[in-house]
Image: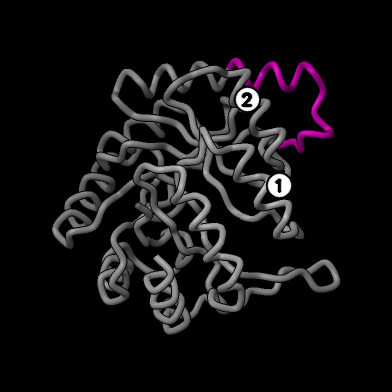
Amino acid sequence: MIHPGLVSITFRKLSPRQIVDLVVQAGLDAIEWGGDVHAPHGDVAKAQGIAQMTADAGLAMPTYGSYYRVGHRADVPFPDVLVSAVALGTPTIRVWAGKVGSAEADTAYWNAVIADSQRIVDLAATEGIGIAYEFHGNTLTDSAESARRLLEAVDRSTLRTLWQPPKGSTVEENRAGIDTLASWISHIHTFSWRIEEGQTIRLPLDEYAIQWKEYLARIDALGGERYALIEFVRDDDPAQFLADAAALRGWL
């Protein structure tokens, strides 16, 4: 089953209280709290307050959206990320697979990201928490094939990857990508956009209803519990978010 939710950094200017209230109004089930603004890495008191507020609203916290860049240990100390995740009570920490695209990364860079991935996965496992990569451009998980290569190289049972349609990808490529990562897909970042003259144009979520229904059904057929988390709302507009949430609930 796939449940609907929100990525909190969709509304960076809103407070955690405003976000919780908006998610409840939208009829969604969960929030992925971001580690840059709403639940800062290492701020245990803030995380505990957010955890209580979220739980009181009957919402789940399936993942903590950290900004840890694997292989770049000095940027964000992973222990700070981990204590926030523990305070939130989330089962998964989202991390970024470096800062270099898979085609540009040399063997030494791949090896550094692999080794650091193993380190943080093992540290998180001591707290009963899993790790999931952001599936994103300019990282080693910028395609399904490179993400699978990294996941297989790290070789940890508590490591997964999120999924979202890569920029400029076709429906056929996305189908194949889901199949390639079938054993590792955790949650889904859900949005609709198009590229015009190199610019990303945000659209209402139901602009790509046919495609999203197919992607969600394909992932749901893999079995297990997952969350489809809305992000990148057109114009950062809460009213558009409510419309997007209604569309997502209908598909699910």
**Helix, strand or loop at mark 2:** loop
Task: Give residue 74's position: percent from left, percent from top.
Answer: 57, 27
Viewer-side residue, 231 vs 227: 227
SS at mark 1?
Answer: loop
Quadrant where the C terminus sits is bottom left
x 50%, y 40%: residue:
185
Residue 107 within the segment the image draws in magenta = yes
Q: Is residue 169 above or below residue 141?
A: below
Q: Is residue 104 magenta?
A: yes
Colour scheme of the rendered structure? one colour
Res 102 → quadrant = top right
Mark 2 lies on residue: 71
Residue 42 falls in image quadrant: top left
Disc number for residue 77: none
Depth check, mark 2 against mark 1: the one in front is 1
Query: Which residue: 38% across, 54% down?
Result: 2
Q: Indicate left or right for 210 with 250 as reference.
A: right
Residue 134: % across, % down:
56, 43
Q: Which three-letter amino acid code belongs to the residue tagged 1? A: Gly
Task: State the residue at coordinates (17%, 62%).
Answer: 57
Q: Please name whichever residue, 45 or 149, is drawn nearer the observer in this view of the structure.
A: 149
Q: Residue at x 47, y 59 (%)?
A: 9
The count of marks equals: 2
Residue position for label 1? 137
Label 2 crowd (10 A; few <14 / some 14-19 / many >=20): many
Q: Nearer the viewer, residue 77 or 4?
A: 4
**Residue 177: image x %, image y %?**
66, 45
CA gap between label 2 and label 1 equals: 16 Å
Amino acid beneath label 2: Gly
> Is residue 159 or residue 93 the one in the foreground?
159
Against 119, is 67 above or below? below
